[in-house]
Each structure stands twice: as structure tokens, then as C-alpha cells.
Amino acid sequence: MQCSWKAVLLLALASVAIQYTAIRTLTSKPFQLCPLPSPQNCGLPGGPETEPPFDGRGGCDDYPYFNFSASRKTHILVLATTRSGSSFVGQLLNQHADVFYLFEPLYHVQTALIPRLSHSRNAADRRVMLGASRDLLRSLYGCDLYFLESYIKPPPANHTTDKLFRRGASRALCSQPVCDAFGPVDGNVEEGDCVKKCAALNMSLAADACREKRSVAIKIVRVPEIGDLRALVEDPRLNIKVIQLVRDPRGILSSRIETFRDTYRLWRIWRATGRRPYNLDLSQLTVVCEDFLSSVSTGLSNPHWLKGKYMLVRYEDLARNPLPKTREIYNYLGLPMDKNVEQWIQANTRGSTELSAKHKYGTVRDSAANAESWRLKLSYDMVEYTQATCQKVLHQLGYSAVKSAEELKNMSLSLVQDKTFVPFS
Ligand SMILES: *[C@@H]1O[C@H](CO)[C@@H](O)[C@H](O)[C@H]1NC(C)=O
Ligand SMILES: *[C@@H]1O[C@H](CO)[C@@H](O)[C@H](O)[C@H]1NC(C)=O
Ligand SMILES: *[C@@H]1O[C@H](CO)[C@@H](O)[C@H](O)[C@H]1NC(C)=O
Ligand SMILES: *[C@@H]1O[C@H](CO)[C@@H](O)[C@H](O)[C@H]1NC(C)=O
């Protein structure tokens, strides 16, 4: 038996795929290294098995069927939080012809493992979620999409599912050969059209498409801070480049109030009545600021393990100067920017710098232009409260506080200080 006894034991213990993942996450060091696998001692990909992914995998501790060092792929990780402009950044990567993009696959981990987690900071829940997340990310970077299936409900049959979260946000999953509904001339497929017109997603085809691309980009909003990803960043088989996206917490708050109407109901009441409800869940705000603070502090302290692998991006900078900022991002990633990306920026932001400078606060029809619209939407006391709560992180990221309602509503007064966060290499 060439495979490790631990893996064999775990396989025997685990009849259900999810359990296997959870058990492994808790019992073994989740990120231990496994010697580079070879087809002789581990199950081959796409073997004859029709069972869920964990069977027929031989017993390698890790992922037997891809060869990271051979792939020379760039593994891009967009570390973000909800309503921080991450869809926009995701698009800047998704539009690239040689990038395989996935929109928050960790959604499935959360719904499978800890359905009620949404606000839980319970340490054990968090650990399970993080361990499973890192395992999943690692396998996705290797284009092993079968691994993801164990988290999808209902479980995909014959490696086919119509339940992949936000499939339509991924260009590769909405175009040939993964989806036959659109030809190359159809250009950019709307997310809704993709979901409506493409047949159920064939995970084998999707994995093939992934392997064809030079880079895999994954956007996540369920990992609190960069420190949680250290094991992944340090994994020598991966070539991770982290893009940490931040945004003014006042903008995040405002955007969440608009978007998550139920969860942020009390904040709307505050806004409407001018009185702060006594039972307001303040952690909905403080968590964002605490996570940013610890993450950015780590990132900017230049630890050796992030050398050349960390770039801090403020959403507001992208919104103001989408094209130059995007070039900077691609430069950091070591990828040539392609014309699809440029065209997408042109179409969605009125791209050119000159224009967006002139129309900085005008009604440009993209999300980026709304980066500072929170100033017109939040009341002054909400802003004041947020500034007090998030003082440190505002300062660290170069966002100015306002001292009066007049300042808040005066859009010619910029609250975003010029600041460069140079990625070190
Ligand atoms: C992985 O790729 C390297 C470089 O191409 C190659 O030398 C090695 O044999 C490959 N390993 C396996 C297990 O395929
Ligand atoms: C899966 O494929 C097998 C063999 O092609 C077929 O008999 C079975 O009905 C399929 N299952 C589903 C749920 O489509
Ligand atoms: C998915 O695609 C693979 C590769 O082309 C094919 O062999 C398989 O039959 C497809 N699965 C289904 C359920 O259509
Ligand atoms: C708005 O801010 C600008 C820039 O600081 C300032 O010059 C202007 O007087 C302010 N307008 C009002 C109405 O306060």
C-alpha cells in the first residue's frame, strides 16, 4: 500500500463526503504537504467511478490528479467582503480570455457545513469553515471541480448540476465548450441569460475549461482575514497572488443597508427615524472594521510569507481610475492585460481617465461610480457613529472623517486621501 495510512483510515471512517472533509479538517493538520502525486499510487482523475468524488480516489492525503508545479498557473485570490466592490474586481479578472474565474465557491461550504453561521463567530464553527475552505480553494486552484460537488445541494448526479452558486458570473462557465447556448459573437453573456439558457453545468467540462486557462481567479467573501490563508499562500505547489480589496466601511454599510434589506432592517429604521434602535446589531459594522484592520495590518507589515503575493486595492481608487488601476493589478499578477478587459472597462465605467475625472460624481452607469454615493444615503449620525467605531481602520486606509453634515454632503470635498500601498516584491 503506497498511500498513507491516515488517509486510508479517514476514508474508512467517512462514509459521507462532507463528514470526510470536516473530519480531515479537524484531525489532521489541514495543510500538510503530500509528496507530488503520481498516477501509480493514486486514483486517476476521471476514472470509471460514478460515485461521489471521494470514492475511487485512492488514498492520497491530498489531491492526486493535478500537477501544480507543471501547470505554472497563477492562482489569483480576491479577498473581499460583501458590498466592497468585489463583483467589479471579479469582472476585471473574469473578462480576461486566459483566466478561469469563480465567484465565491465558499458559499457552498458555508451552506453545507454551517447553514446558520452567517453571523456566528463561534470559534469551532469558524475553524471548521476555514479548514474546509482552504482545502476547497486548494483543489479548485488545481481545477478539481469534483471536490466542490460534495458541498453542493442537492448533490450533483453524473457530475452535473444546475445549483452552482453564481455560475452565470463566470465567463468560462457560460461559453463554449462548457455551454453551447452562445457563440463567440454573442459577446458578453448576461448572468441571468447564462443561467436560463445554458444546460445544467457539466463539471467535467468545466474542469477541462479550467485546465485550459493560464490562471484561476477566485473571489471570496467568507474568509475574515489574510492570516487565515497563510497555509494556502505558503503552499509551494500553488502560485498564489492575493488581491485584498477594501472599501470605506461607511460605503460598505450603506450598500449593505440597501442590499440586505432584512438583515439590516434596524439600520434602515435608524436612517428613517433618526433614532438608533436599542437592539441594533452593531457587530454588523464592527466585524468589517476589525477584519479589515487585522488583515491590512498583517498585509502592510510585510511578513516574509506574503512577499510578492499581496496587493491592497481600495475600491475607490479603482472607481476613479479604472484603467490605470487595473493595469497596475495585472502588472502585479504578472499577466498581460488583454483587450477584453479594456473593452469591458470602457463599456462599464466610461473607462478613460479623463472622462471619469470630469464626471467623477456624475451618473455613470456602473457600480464603480457609486463608490461614494453613500454620502448621500447615510444620515450624519450614522456616519459619525461609523467613524467613531472604525476610526483606526479609516485612518490606516486613508479615508477622511467628516465633521459635519455639510461636509458629508459636499461632494466636491474628497474623503479619499491619495495613498499608495506599494506591493513589495
Ligand atoms: C509534474 O510536472 C513536472 C514538470 O513538467 C514533471 O517533470 C513531472 O513528472 C510531473 N509530475 C507528475 C506526477 O505528472
Ligand atoms: C446518470 O447516468 C446514468 C448512465 O448514463 C443514467 O442511467 C442515470 O439516469 C443518470 N442519472 C441522472 C440523475 O441523470
Ligand atoms: C460531461 O462532459 C463529459 C466530457 O465531454 C462527457 O463525457 C459526459 O458524458 C458529460 N456528462 C453528461 C452528464 O452529459
Ligand atoms: C465644499 O468643499 C469644497 C472643497 O473643500 C469647498 O471649497 C467648498 O467651499 C465647500 N462647499 C460648501 C458649500 O461648503
Image: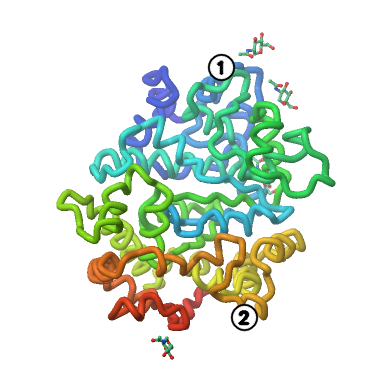
Q: Closer to us: mark 1 or mark 2?
A: 2
Residue 205 versus residue 198: which sits nearer the camera? 198
Q: Which residue is the site of mark 2?
A: 358
- Mark 2 crowd level (few <14, some 14–19, many ≥20, 10 Å Cα): few
Question: Position of 282 compared to 412: left or right?
Answer: left
Amino acid residing under circle 2 = Lys
Rendered view: 410 above or below 278:
below
Question: Position of 345 compared to 60: left or right?
Answer: right
Instruction: For marks 1 and 2, give the CA distance.
Output: 58 Å
Q: Could you say which disc has been placed on residue 187 in the image? A: none
Q: Position of residue 286 (x, y in %)?
A: 26, 59
Q: Which residue is the site of mark 1?
A: 51
Residue 420 versus residue 47: which sits nearer the camera? 420
Q: Position of residue 291 (x, y in %)?
A: 32, 59
- Mark 1 crowd level (few <14, some 14–19, many ≥20, 10 Å Cα): few
Q: Quadrant of residue 142?
A: top right
User: Regarding mark 1 in the picture, which secondary structure is present there?
Assistant: loop
Q: Position of residue 279 (x, y in %)?
A: 17, 49
